[in-house]
Amino acid sequence: MSALILDGKALAADLRTELLARTSALREFGIHPKLVIVFVGENESSVAYVRNLVKTGERVGVAVEVERLPEHANAALVRERLDRLRDDPAVHGVMLQQPLPLHLSIREIADAIPVHKDVDGTHPTNQGHLAFGSGTEFVPATPAAVMLLLERSPHWPLRGRRAVMIGRSIVVGAPVAMLMLAQDATVTVLHKESTSLQPYVKMAEIVIVATGVPGLIRGDDLAPGATVIDVGTTVVDGHLKGDVDYDSAFEVAGAITPVPGGVGPVTNVALLQNVVKSAERMSGLGRP
C-alpha cells in the first residue's frame, strides 16, 4: 500500500489564492491588513519561520512587521510592547513569537496580547474558549493547519473516528485534541510521561505527532490505512526531519503529510487568514 500524500504546498497555494481575493476586496475600501510579530531573542528556527511569514504576507497582501526585542528582555518589557499595539487601528493582528528565551514564561505574558487581535490564539481567553468548545475567535495557526489537512484526508469527517494525538503542548497537542473532539472524534492524548504509545497508536485511524523527536513513529507502529499528520520539524545533519519515519510510514499509511511540505506551508497561510478575518471584522466588512 502506498499512501495518499497530503500536499501542504498545494493546499497552501489554493488558500493563498482565496486570501488574495479577500485582501484585494479590503484594499478597495482603503484597508491594508497588518500583522505585528513581537520577537524576543534570536531563536534560529523562529527567524526562519518569521522570514517565511513575511514572504507569504507579501504574496497575499498582508503586511507583516517584526518588532525585535533583545534576548535579555524581561516580562514587563514584553508585556508593554504587546499592550501598546492594543489600540493601534492600523494593526489587525498581534503575535508573540515562540519559543521564548528560557527566562520568560508564556504564562506570565500571554494575557497582555490584545485578545481581539490574538491571531495565533495564545491569549488565555481564546485558549479557554477553545477548551470549552464555545468557539474561539482565532484558532491557533498550526492546529488550524492540521485540521485543514485532515479535511482532505480519507478519514474526514472525524465523527466516531479513533484518533491519537502524540504530544500535549498548549501550542499544538492540546488545541488539536480539542479541535478533534469538537468534530466528535474519539481522542487519546499520549505524551512523554505515557508508559507506552501502544496499543493506542496501532488502534488509531488518525495519528497526529508533535513531539520534536525525529523518527519517533515508524510504519510498523501504524494501523494499515491510517491518516498520519506529522507536525515535527527537527534539523538533523542539515536536513529537516519529522517525528514520523516517512519512508516506512508511507508503505503502511492511507494518507500522510511530508516534512517539509506538509503542515508548515499551511500554518503560514492559516495565521494570515486570521489576520484578514480580524481586518474584516474591525472594518465592519466581515463575512456574515
Image (cartoon, grey):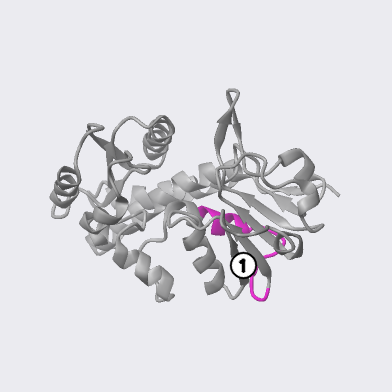
Q: Indicate the secondary structure of the residue bearing disc 1.
A: strand
Please tell me which residue lies in front, 234 or 126.
234
Q: Which residues are magenta?
A: 145-160
Q: Is residue 59 visible?
A: yes
Provide residue 17's location: percent of width, then percent of height: 48, 46
Q: Quadrant of residue 136?
A: bottom left
Q: Residue furthest right?
A: 1
Residue 287 seen anywhere in this rendered image of the structure: no
Residue occupying image coordinates x 43% and y 54%: 171
Instruction: Check residue 37 for magenta coloring.
Output: no
Residue 150: which quarter of the image? bottom right
The x and y percentages for residue 71 are 26, 32
Q: Is residue 236 above or below residue 36?
A: above
* Magenta stretch secondary structure, dominant: loop
Tell me the residue that label 1 is attached to: 188
Q: Residue 86: x and y, percent?
A: 16, 54
Number of numbered discs on residues: 1
> Who's the residue at 37% across and 55% down the image?
274
Q: Which amino acid, mark 1?
A: Thr
Determine the residue positioned at 30% across, 67% down: 125
Kindly identify the residue that appears in the image at 38 percent across and 36 percent down: 50
* Picture quarter with the C terminus: bottom left
Above or below: residue 280 compared with residue 72:
below
Alpha-carbon neighbours of circle 1 within 10 Å: few (<14), some, or many (≥20)?
Answer: some
Question: Left or right: where does residue 114 sit relative to residue 106?
Answer: left
Residue 3 percent coordinates (x, y) = 78, 49
Between residues 218 and 161, which one lies in front from this camera angle? 218
Q: Quadrant of residue 285?
A: bottom left
